[in-house]
Amino acid sequence: MIRERLAALVAESSDGAISEHEALTATVPLTALGLTSIGQLRLVDAIETEFGVTVDLTGDGLDLLDDLDRLAGHLAGR
Amino acid sequence: MTIRFSAPDSGTAPLTWGQRAIWEAVERTAPDDHYFNFGRVLKVPGTRTVAEVTVALTALVERHGSLRTLLADPVGQRLEATGRMPVEVTTGDPDKVMAELAATRFDYHAEWPLRVALVLDGDTVTHVVLVFCHLATDGLGSDVALRDLRTLLLRGRVSGPPAPRPLDLAHWQAGPQGRQVADAAAAHWADEHARMPDTMFAGPSGDPADPPIRRALLRSPALQLATRAVALANRTSTSTVLLAATATLAGRFSGSGRCAMLPIVGNRFRRDTLGIVSTLSQEGLFTLDVDGDFPDVLRAAAPAAMRAYRSAYHDPADRARIVRDESDRRGTAVHPNCCFNDMRFADPGPAACTPADLDAALPATALEWQMSQDKLNCRFCVHVTTEGVSLTADTRHLSSDAIERYLHALEDLLVEAARR
């Protein structure tokens, strides 16, 4: 469920440049699919608001944002 | 002629963070503050008369509070429900009309923050020229206004909820949630201030121009290709690649191993700020250690850029306090005097290119001197547009010759990185 919800947030944050389906089936990083830095920040804000977490804006934090599976795992395991 | 608007709402509020930031820049740049005016031209769809277009314009001004907001004394904002706004009717060239309307500063307390001209061909309005006071909106907000005006011309109304208002944003920012966001941003500003150099480009260039502020634009398809390729290889955005490259060379040209730079950030990351016609953009603070190979520098730059972008949504009062404290501690004024503004509405995104593509593109590179003026609130401003990359600099600190060398070095750095 978290994974699907995150995919919807990716679609919203990218203004549809990445569809929910594309986010769910991605085999490359989301940035390679066209998630811009603005899109990433929108995604960070949406995740923080919705999941009540603080996203760490470090290299590791950004790697996590680039990978829906790892991000979902991280949010599920918190 | 004039349009007469009548909306249901009025009121006063403090300035929003974004309004305060641009107001401070305007005050520092006056009397050359027309620098901040900017215009947009809307090609009118279909065949519309002056009367039809003025109906749509009236609805636009009634919908967006920011377009009927004046600067209040003491400094604050005053939203007016009713008023009359002048509209010029002309047969001139739209771009020239826009330049004329933008050429003089706004009377922030008494003049509506929007200047309008309708361009006629016979009885048909072909273009609407809008020139915005930067206190009313930034580029992304003007895009919202333009889209709404087009919708109003086509459909007579904009569906959905009422447009978000700067007045409400000002109240949110002053409330507990706004304070929480501001505190997190202030922590970043304080950390970066502790490690940044006092300033950039402090030394004299020895070769000032008259007037001292000059702008050169580099049109370079090769730079664009290279930027996209480097973004792809480094899993980051073209904007961050350009910020990192700009900062790296600013450090080198300024003789500083650590660069401090103020990226202008759109601040439209939250659902409540996405679609507002207002000035949300503010400076963030980005510091970067620029010694070493560019690929290594870029690796460190990406997360640093994200933190800078995020902390750009800040309360200028916090920033003023932090700058004052750090300046007092060091006994000298601490300020980067060095900024970066990616003004493109859309990031072209990462894309691969081959060395042959770069070779083929390089001969098309051209540099053009664009403007000069007396005053600017900065020493070094890089602007990225769809046309290219420009550098506006104070030639008392960076000579005209160095401005040219800088822009070519930027192209070299990115093309070289893309070839690896």
Image (cartoon, coloured by chain):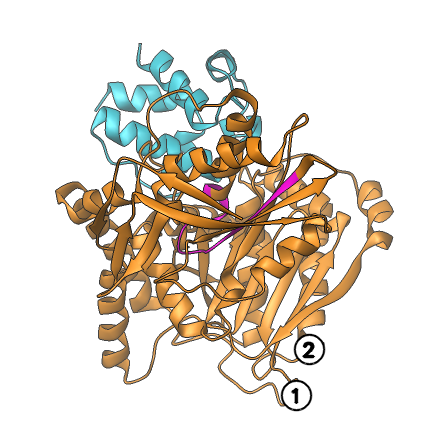
How far apart are the alpha carbons under marks 1 and 2? 8 Å
Counting the numbered discs, the total is 2
Which stretch is magenta? B127-141
Checking the image for residue B207, the label placed there is 1
**Residue B5 percent location from the top left of the image:** 39, 40
B287 lies left or right of B227: left
The residue lying at 20 percent from left, 42 percent from top is B172
Q: Position of residue B1 (x, y in %)?
A: 54, 48
Residue B189, image x, y percentages: 29, 60
Q: Is residue B140 magenta?
A: yes
Question: Chain letter for orange?
Answer: B
Chain under disc 1: B
Instruction: Tell me the number on the disc at residue B400.
Output: 2
Q: Are marks 1 and 2 in contact (CB under 8 Å)?
A: yes
**Badge 2 amino acid:** Ser
Q: Amino acid at mark 1?
A: Asp
The residue that appears at 26% across and 53% down in the rendered structure is B78
Q: Colour of chain A?
A: cyan
